[in-house]
Each structure stands twice: as C-alpha cells, then as structure tokens.
Image (cartoon, rainbow, N blue to C red):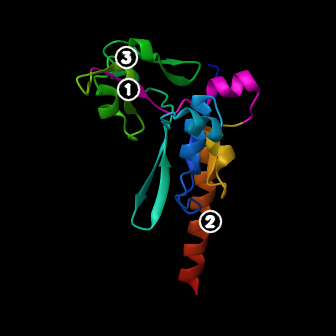
C-alpha cells in the first residue's frame, strides 16, 4: 500500500505570536488581489479567512487545518465543501450559507461572510462560507512558495507544515521535555 503525503496546514506557535494581526491583513489583501493603498482608495471591505484570537496573555491565529476526513465536507448539505488533492475547498456558488460547516468545524475556522450586494431591506439573504485555502490559487498562479499570512508574520510564528513534519516536531519537543523532567528529578 502506497502511503500518500498528508495534508498541509498552517501551524501557529503561540509562544511567538504577539497578536499583531498582520496575518489577517495579509490574508485579506491576498484574497482581494490588491495592495493596501488600492483597497483603501477603492473603499474595499477586506475580509480575512483567518482570525487572531486573544485569550488572556496568549494570541493565536485560527485557520483551517485541511482535515484529512473533513467534518465540514461531510456535513455540507449542498456539496459546496469538498476535498480534492488533499485540500478542503469551497465552491461558494453552491453555498447556501446554512452555517452547518461552521458548527461542525473542530477548529472554528469557517466563517460565514455576508455579501453587501445581496442585502434586501438591510438584511442579508445569504452568506457564503469562507476559510483558509492556504493561498492555493495565489501560490499556483504566482509561483509563491508560501501563504500570505506566513510571509507577513514578523515573528515567524506561522509556518506552512504537513502533518508528518508536525508530528515529528511534537515528538522531538516531548522528548526534550521528558529529558528535562528526568534531569530535574535526579538532582
């Protein structure tokens, strides 16, 4: 049996994240396909596909983990969310804004964005599900090597990793902790 490489996702190190939200801005600009000056001049409403959450003295960006067996894809009643080539993708034209995907996401990474053009009597008819797409089209079209959020992080708290590398790093860190704990108990 041939083992396929596991999914890529964004890993954020909470020890390095300072909550500056540069990753949110970079994400929003990358998906608006413009720079900050153009966005301001055009009065664009920028919408990031990630969000930085702050809990007490710790900050961390929340992004899609591109789950191997994605609960959001299984729960989507219209098939708007699907898995292809190890990525979880959204076909926004099929999305009805029911929010089921948002409710089942274990990481809270799916947001429902309301389209300003779709308002009737001040209320939005439908929203569309959005989530981190790892800047896939941006990386393919422009031969970018990483995601916009990774490139924008001033402390390098965010990296693009695959599960295999992530697990290896976790085991190394746990091994170091065990050695330190064992050394402390001997003294």
Image quarter where the N terminus lies is top right
For marks 1 and 2, the one nearer the N-term is: 1
What residue range appears in magenta? 125-145
Residue 139 belongs to magenta span: yes
Above or below for 29 versus 96: below
State how far apart marks 3 and 1 are (Cα). 16 Å
In the displayed orientation, state which residue is furthest to the front.
41
| In the image, residue 60 lies in the stretch drawn in magenta | no
| Residue under pointer 3 | 95
Q: CA distance from mark 1 to mark 2?
A: 51 Å
Report the mark closest to the observer, 2 or 3.
3
- Residue pointed to by mark 1: 116
User: x, y (%) of residue 51?
Assistant: 46, 45
Q: Which residue corresponds to the image point at 59% horizontal and 61% vertical from the top-left?
A: 16
Q: Which residue is mark 2?
A: 176
The residue that appears at 38% across and 21% down in the rendered structure is 117
Circle 2: element type: helix
**Is residue 4 something that shows in the picture?**
no
In this rendering, the answer to whether 154 lies above or below 6 is below
- Label 3 residue SS: loop
Q: Earlier in the sequence, mark 3 or mark 1?
A: 3
Separation of residues labelled 2 and 3 (CA atoms) = 46 Å
Residue under the image location 58 percent in, 46 percent down: 23
Whichever of labels 2 and 3 marks the residue nearer the N terminus, that label is 3
């Amino acid at each position: 049996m041939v083992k396929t490489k596991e999914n890529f996702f964004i890993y954020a190190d909470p020890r390095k994240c300072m909550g500056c939200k540069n990753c949110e801005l970079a994400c929003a600009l990358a998906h608006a396909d413009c720079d900050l000056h153009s966005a301001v001049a055009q009065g664009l409403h920028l919408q990031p596909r990630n969000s930085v959450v702050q809990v007490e003295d710790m900050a961390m960006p929340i992004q899609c983990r591109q789950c191997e067996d994605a609960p959001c894809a299984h729960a989507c009643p219209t098939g708007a969310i699907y898995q292809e080539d190890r990525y979880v993708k959204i076909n926004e034209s099929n999305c009805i804004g029911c929010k089921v995907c948002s409710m089942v996401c274990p990481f809270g990474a799916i947001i429902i964005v309301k389209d300003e053009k779709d308002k009737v009597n001040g209320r939005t008819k439908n929203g569309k599900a959005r989530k981190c797409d790892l800047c896939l089209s941006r990386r393919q079209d422009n031969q970018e090597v990483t995601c916009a959020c990774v490139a924008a992080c001033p402390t390098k708290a965010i990296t693009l990793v695959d599960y295999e590398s992530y697990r290896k790093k976790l085991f190394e860190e746990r091994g170091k902790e065990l050695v330190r704990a064992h050394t402390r108990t001997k003294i």
